[in-house]
Amino acid sequence: HCYNTDGCYLIYDAEAIWHRRDELLLNRVDHSLLSNETLKNLPEISRTYDFRRGQEQHLLSKANAVTTVSAVEKAHILSILSVQNVSIDAYVIGHVMPEMLLSSFSFQDRRGLFFVAGFHGGMYYNGDAIFWFLRTVFPQIQTKGPIPLLIAGHQIPSYLQIWLETYEYKNLVTLLESPNDLQPLYDQSRILVVPHQYGTGIQYKVSESMSAGLPCVLSHVAANGFNSNNDS
């Protein structure tokens, strides 16, 4: 329960609007490119969507102010609340990045693509992102020559590991479980790929890699958090 009593100024810190992620998954994503694991869970995600959406809206409506990481999220929050005739203050507070060291490696000395994520053992969201990339984009890239991909993250899903065993380009894909320090990985890579097909907020990995001087290639969904709505 959330109570806003007289004399109390309540701030809701919205890292992202979480029901929006599932909304995109259910309504806008080509389900043929999702992992079987996520497809299996779609009925449950759909069944609980309205409850989670209502819960999030309820929490927002009880606050005096909301902070979010992007102008896109702010606009979405205010749109949600306007339907409920609720007016609150909304502020955009972007990521505050730790000091990152620019790589001493030249672009020519770097090699390959890099994807980093917290998988937490499942394919939902981050797993589906790299699964889509491996199936649709990575094979096309190989027409330019062998280009390796490093996938690093926490609890890399067994589903992805098993699928890679029979993948045509498996010899070009390296899995690195729970690295202690991402800085060397940013240093050695040429490009960070962020191929998410559904999601909200701003990808922290993008802010971090750009702070380290690593170029990023983003899907439209990932770029949307940065208020980028063109094809550049």
Image (spheres, helix red, strand yellow):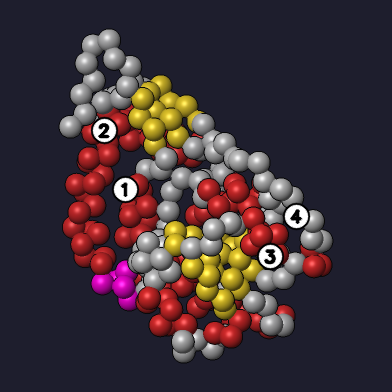
Quick check: 77 above or below 20? above
Mark 4 crowd level (few <14, some 14–19, many ≥20, 10 Å Cα): some
Residue that sits furthest to the top in the current view: 7
> Residue at left 36%, top 25%?
11
Residue picked out by circle 2? 59
Quarter assignment of residue 87: top left
Residue picked out by circle 1? 19
Mark carried by residue 189 = 3
Inspect the image, locate mark 1, and give the three-letter code of the amino acid beneath it. His
Could you tell whether 135 is left or right of 192 in the image?
left
Q: CA distance from mark 3 to mark 1?
A: 33 Å
Residue 23 x %, y %: 33, 53
Inspect the image, locate mark 4, and give the three-letter code of the amino acid beneath it. Ser
Q: Earlier in the sequence, mark 3 or mark 1?
A: 1
Label 2: which secondary element: helix
- Magenta span has 39? yes
Inspect the image, locate mark 3, and give the three-letter code of the amino acid beneath it. Ser
- Which quarter of the rendering shows the C terminus? bottom right
Q: Nearer the viewer, residue 76 or 105?
A: 105
Of marks 1 and 4, the one in the foreground: 4
Label 4: which secondary element: loop
Mark 1 crowd level (few <14, some 14–19, many ≥20, 10 Å Cα): many
> Residue at left 39%, top 28%?
66
Whether residues under marks 4 and 2 lie with C-beta atoms below 8 angstroms apart, the answer is: no
Residue 195 x %, y %: 53, 63
Q: CA distance from mark 1 to mark 4?
A: 37 Å
Residue 3 x %, y %: 20, 24
Residue picked out by circle 4? 103
Range of magenta residues: 36-40
